[in-house]
Image (cartoon, grey):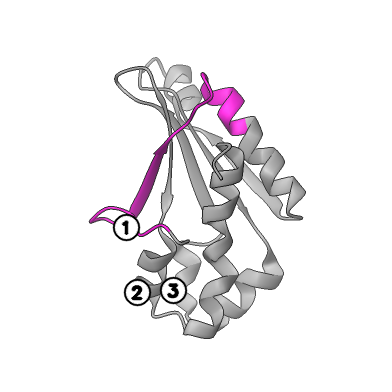
């Protein structure tokens, strides 16, 4: 079942795992298990700390599969603004760990992805559910 996201097209789920690093490692494992490529890990909070600023703990995992993404970008070149796929793992103000990403339906609408290609990015929902231990 695809996640529709909020009015901004963002899906946010609470992680049952107690820390950002633990949740992130589970996501990284799910990426590897599915044969996807991890392109980058951006440590937003670490960058802030290096320049003497503070923010909530936040790390962005960037991943994908050129075999799946290339046909999408060929059909809709501006989709390259949103690909590869990204998942933000961050600490909320109440101390909980959250996982956020762009909803497939949002990306499909935003970039007018042909229906026969939407499946190329729809796996993000299952990947996040698996990493969070959801059914």
Instruction: Return the disc, 3 or 1, that comes first in the chain's sequence.
Output: 1
Q: List x then y, in percent, for residue 91.
A: 40, 24
Q: Residue at x 74, y 47 (%)?
A: 32
Report the magenta residues as a range: 3-24
Q: Earlier in the sequence, mark 3 or mark 2?
A: 3
Residue 30, by quadrant, is top right
Q: Nearer the viewer, residue 21 or 46?
A: 21
Alpha carbon distance from label 2 to label 1: 10 Å
Is 125 in front, or is 107?
125
Q: Which residue bears the numbered disc 1? A: 9
Horizontal and vertical percent position of residue 88? 46, 40
**Height in image: 119 above or below 37?**
below
What residue is shown with label 2? 109
**Compared to 78, does 83 lie above or below?**
above
What mark, if any, has residue 78 been given in the picture? 3
Disc 3 from disc 1: Cα separation: 17 Å
Residue at the image position 35 percent from the left and 22 percent from the top: 55
Q: Position of residue 36 (x, y in %)?
A: 71, 55
């Amino acid at each position: 079942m695809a996640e529709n996201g909020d009015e901004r097209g963002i899906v946010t789920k609470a992680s049952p795992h107690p820390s950002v690093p633990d949740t992130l490692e589970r996501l990284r494992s799910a990426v590897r298990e599915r044969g996807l490529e991890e392109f980058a890990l951006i440590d937003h909070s670490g960058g802030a700390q290096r320049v003497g600023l503070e923010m909530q703990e936040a790390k962005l995992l960037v991943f994908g599969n050129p075999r799946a993404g290339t046909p999408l970008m060929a059909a809709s070149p501006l989709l390259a603004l949103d690909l590869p796929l990204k998942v933000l793992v961050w600490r909320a103000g109440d101390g909980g760990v959250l996982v956020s990403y762009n909803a497939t339906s949002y990306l499909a609408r935003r970039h007018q992805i042909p229906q026969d290609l939407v499946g190329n990015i729809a796996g993000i929902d299952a990947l996040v559910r698996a990493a969070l231990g959801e059914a």
